[in-house]
Amino acid sequence: MGTVVGTPGYAAPEQMHGHVFPASDLYSLAVTCIRLLTGCLLEERNGDWNDKLFDPMQMQWVWRRQNVSVSNELGKVLDKMLLFPIGERYQSASEVLKALNPPPVPPPKIAVPQPTQPKIQVPLSQISFPQSPQIKFLSQSFTENLGNGVKLDMVYIPAGTFTMGAPSTEKDSGDYERPQHRVTIKAFLMGKYPVTQAQWKAVANLPKVNLDLNSDPSRFKGANRPVEQVSWYDAVEFCDRLSRHTGKTYRLPSEAEWEYACRAGTTTPFYFGETITPELANYNGNYTYGLGAKGKYRQETTPVGSFPSNAFGLYDLHGNVYEWCADHWHSNYQSAPNDATIWLTSDERSNRLLRGGSWYSYPRYCRSASRSYYVVAGDGADVIGFRVVCLAAWTL
């Protein structure tokens, strides 16, 4: 009890908290590689550790600043091995080997040159978003007044049945998103946006239920930006305080509710179609998905509502910040509930589930079906926020 196995400066963050996975070893391997490539080892000075490759203020590896000579392809592989949360890393050594040894490019065919087809850029104004004549939500939505001009918009999500998870044909999907299964959801309300810093501050100033809350925890400051660096327990305390204050029942969404609300009747990887661009969401625009083009990598959160909504009128479900769900993490959907039940394990210490991707994420992790988790529910990060659901208020 209390013993941690691992070398400081090399062991993965989750390992220093007593949790170890195959991806933890891959993290340590990548650290070893970048220290060998740069020659920058961890140094102890007067009892303090000095590390030129890691920025503790940003909680990020900055080994590229050493101007080491390394191919861009290898650099990307090492960067992904060092990602946090753990779900964004390679999950096995075979995945790393595949990334290091991509299929060879066939030699060019000798042929008469043909004119290349120009890439079609579709103006955002011409993109149509799916609508359903059966969906009637605006009249049953409402706004919660949190005081001092701060409001919380809640959007009505109608009852329905959908196919949860990703088909095996979906690009960059994994077995942890399968088997696909039909899920029936009762009507509920969900926050129009991730909880903002203004909303967080208003509720953090309400009387304590179980935990103390930092009224200004976020790294990227802005009243209308999503709150981040909040733990799963912090988010639950927010819901408890809001419930007591309003007399309604607020909580984190179940994973099934989250995906149902995100998809809003769609079956494509994203609620706006088969691909994603930085004009549609906030993620790492240096990387692409499908036929999408590269674009701006903002390297920070953006104000909520900066990008198009889905058919339910919800914003920022792809990128910006990961969102806590109420469920524990399960490695696949075997024996998953066929309704909106919060799916828990017998161990309260099990990993808590995240959805939606973040400003830091590759586009594949922003898909509607993509799932991730955070090893320590009591910790937060600048890529993690949340949104709330309300169960019965719409019937009042």
Image: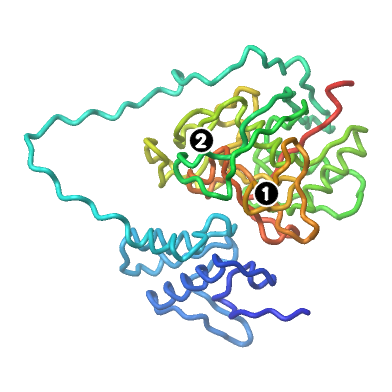
Check disc 2 and report the residue beneath it.
269
Q: Quadrant of residue 369?
A: top right
Discs 1, 2 touching: Cβ within 8 Å:
no
Image quarter hosting the C terminus:
top right
* Outermost residue, top side: 133
Check disc 1 and report the residue beneath it.
228
Q: Secondary structure at mark 2?
A: loop
Crowding near the residue tagged with mark 2, few <14, some 14–19, many ≥20 C-alpha atoms within 10 Å: many
Provide residue 345's location: percent of width, then percent of height: 77, 55
What label does residue 206 carry, if any? none
Q: Is residue 73 above or below residue 137?
A: below
Q: Is residue 45 above or below residue 118?
A: below
Provide residue 301's location: percent of width, then percent of height: 58, 44
In the rendered picture of this protein, how many numbered marks are placed on residues?
Answer: 2
Q: Secondary structure at mark 1?
A: loop
User: Which amino acid, by three-letter code, is at mark 1?
Assistant: Glu
Q: Quadrant of residue 367?
A: top right
Provide residue 98's location: percent of width, then percent of height: 38, 59
Labels 1, 2: front one: 2
Q: Residue at x 63, y 44 (%)?
A: 355
User: Which amino acid, by three-letter code, is at mark 2?
Assistant: Pro
Q: Residue at x 57, y 44 (%)?
A: 370
1 or 2: tag closer to the N-terminus: 1
Q: Is residue 166 left or right of residue 106?
A: right
Image quarter hosting the N terminus:
bottom right
* Outermost residue, front side: 335
Specify how the rendered protein is coloured: rainbow
Provide residue 185's location: percent of width, then percent of height: 73, 30
Q: Is residue 347 above or below residue 291?
A: below
Q: Residue at x 66, y 56 (%)?
A: 374
Instruction: Using the numbered discs, state the Cα–Cα distance from disc 1 to disc 2 in whole angstroms.
Output: 25 Å
